[in-house]
Image (tube, rainbow, N blue to C red):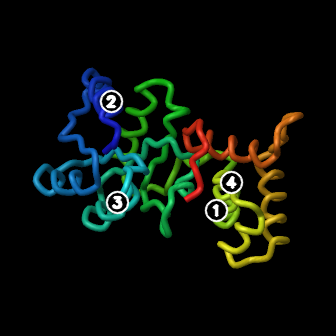
Amino acid sequence: MEDDSLARASLSRSFNNTGIEIAFTAKTAGEFLSLWRTRPINLALLDCHLGDGPTGIDVARKLRQEDKDIALVFLTSFEDPRMLAGENTELPVGSRYLTKQKVETISTLVNTMREAVEKPREPISGITSPFHSLSDSQIETLGLVAQGLSNAEIAKRQFVSEKTVENHIRKISKELNITTPSGMNSRVHFAKVYLRAMGLTEISPVI
């Protein structure tokens, strides 16, 4: 399941010579679940972000709830699923997590998919980026910095003091080993680091 039509088509072509049979492709959560009801599968390849509406993680939880043995593989641009907006970004048991930035060959993806089918209820694996060492509140703080919010605005949103926000930013910088290049605003550099980890290159406006 992938909301980008070109990416779906590219993956489908890549799977042609791997021995993997594609039951269906889908753009949205609703479309996927509708097709899944009539076309049984043993593995779901999911993206985290699907635009407006339910996420790939929402779909995965639904699948795991109804099928304890279905294999779940995420292929996404997010270095950490907690970068996805929403209250619950915890992955279901057995999920395999791959980032598009690090999958250089189709064989890497295929091998992960086959392992997931063989052992669908193994512990969650694949989340290995430095962002995984950050707490939920630190991830949120970094995201708000990337949106251009001041420490005061972040403190107000999180119902904490500005001092707490400053501490979060300091710890984030240490955990991610962020060193701001000479001549660059530190907050702009934080934003670049965060957006790269989301597979993005441009700063989105604050809403």
In front: mark 4 or mark 2? 4
Residue 197 point in image, percent of width and height? 61, 43
Residue 164 point in image, percent of width and height? 81, 71
Q: Earlier in the sequence, mark 4 or mark 3?
A: 3
Instruction: Find residue 6 and name its label.
Output: 2
Q: Residues within 10 Å of mark 2 (few under 14, many from 20)?
A: few
Q: Mark 3 near mark 1, Cβ–Cβ under 8 Å?
A: no
Q: Earlier in the sequence, mark 3 or mark 1?
A: 3
In the image, taking residue 33 as reference, residue 126 lies left or right, namely: right
Q: Earlier in the sequence, mark 1 or mark 4?
A: 1
Task: Examine the rendered structure and indicate whether residue 163 appears above or below residue 34.
Answer: below
Mark 1 vs mark 2, CA separation in Å: 30 Å
Dot 3: element: loop
Task: Examine the rendered structure and indicate whether residue 196 appears above or below residue 28.
Answer: above
Dot 2: element: helix
Q: Earlier in the sequence, mark 4 or mark 2?
A: 2
Instruction: Find residue 148 and name its label.
Output: 4
Q: Residue at x 58, y 50 (%)?
A: 205
Q: Residues within 10 Å of mark 4 (few under 14, many from 20)?
A: some
In the image, taking residue 156 as reference, residue 19 lies left or right, namely: left
**Residue that carries the numbered disc 1 in the rendered image:** 140
